[in-house]
Image (spheres, rainbow, N blue to C red):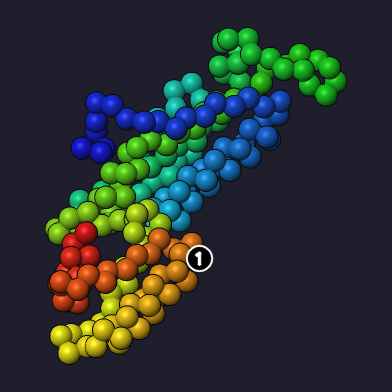
């Protein structure tokens, strides 16, 4: 449902440059940005490449692409694209700028985009038969600290010492930018808590 939907959010950009060199550089810079979204944020490995003449954006000079792989189905999937449109649309619509010599010239245009389809790619790469698995940088909770060794014979004083140490660890993690919480509920065993949080 995240790959083919009736409605989706689309991050799209359109830019114009005085030189082809500037436009070419931006095409690759945006593609690198999309690679970082997939690999560094979503923990999805991708391959960067260039589309064939038949696959490129209609009317553009060339299209670069960020491609992923879905192991469960053994197929590749387009993750994002960055297009160099050249001066083709500038000619059509008369889009000009003034160059260094104060002469009018056609601009070089780019177009690039990524959609909420990325959510589907992330789910298909990381999910399993037990349900949704989120990579650490996307998960709302990255670490849960569960105190161990507490049982019915543990004194209140010792119990409070353990809980204080747990909260100290949580604070240290949070100070380091990690979304951490503790589970110090007395009504459940450590084993029950492990299962609970693994299923979350």
Mark 1 surroundings: few (<14), some (14-19) or many (≥20) residues within 10 A = few
Query: Residue 47 appears at what percent x and percent y?
Result: 43, 51
The residue lying at 44 percent from left, 41 percent from top is: 65
Q: Quadrant of the C terminus?
A: bottom left
Please say if 56 is above or below 41. above
Which of the pair 188/128 is nearer the observer?
188
Q: Quadrant of the N terminus?
A: top left
Q: Residue furthest front?
A: 156
Left or right: 151, with 93 as reference point: left
Which of the pair 46/5 is nearer the observer?
5
Please say if 197 is above or below 29. below
Q: Residue furthest right?
A: 101
Q: Is there any visible trace of residue 70 in the rendered image?
A: no
Return the residue at label 1.
175
Left or right: 110, with 77 as reference point: right
The residue lying at 56 percent from left, 10 percent from top is: 92
Left or right: 196, with 94 as reference point: left
The residue lying at 16 percent from left, 76 percent from top is: 189
Please say if 118 is above or below 137. above
Query: Residue 176 appears at what percent x and percent y?
Result: 50, 66
The residue lying at 45 percent from left, 64 percent from top is: 174
Query: Residue 68 appears at what percent x and percent y?
Result: 35, 49
Q: Is there any visible trace of residue 20 in the rendered image?
A: yes
Which of the pair 54/95 is nearer the observer?
95
Which of the pair 58/176 is nearer the observer?
176
Residue 141 in which image quadrant: bottom left
Left or right: 189, with 133 as reference point: left
Query: Residue 35 appears at what percent x and percent y?
Result: 47, 49
- Secondary structure found at label 1: helix
């Amino acid at each position: 449902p995240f790959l083919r939907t009736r409605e989706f959010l689309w991050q799209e950009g359109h830019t114009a440059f005085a030189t082809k060199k500037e436009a070419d550089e931006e095409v690759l810079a945006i593609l690198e940005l999309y690679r970082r979204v997939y690999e560094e944020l979503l923990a999805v490995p991708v391959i960067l490449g260039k589309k064939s003449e038949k696959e490129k954006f209609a009317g553009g000079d060339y299209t670069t692409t960020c491609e992923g792989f879905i192991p469960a189905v053994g197929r590749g999937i387009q993750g994002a694209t960055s297009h160099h449109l050249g001066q083709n649309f500038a000619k059509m619509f008369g889009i000009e700028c003034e160059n260094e010599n104060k002469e009018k010239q056609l601009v070089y245009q780019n177009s690039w985009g990524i959609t909420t389809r990325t959510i589907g790619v992330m789910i298909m790469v990381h999910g399993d038969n037990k349900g949704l698995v989120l990579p650490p940088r996307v998960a709302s909770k990255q670490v849960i600290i569960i105190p161990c060794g507490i049982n019915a014979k543990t004194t209140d004083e010792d119990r409070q010492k353990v809980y204080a140490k747990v909260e100290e660890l949580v604070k240290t993690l949070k100070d380091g930018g990690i979304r951490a919480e503790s589970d110090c509920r007395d009504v459940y065993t450590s084993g029950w808590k492990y299962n609970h949080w693994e299923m979350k």
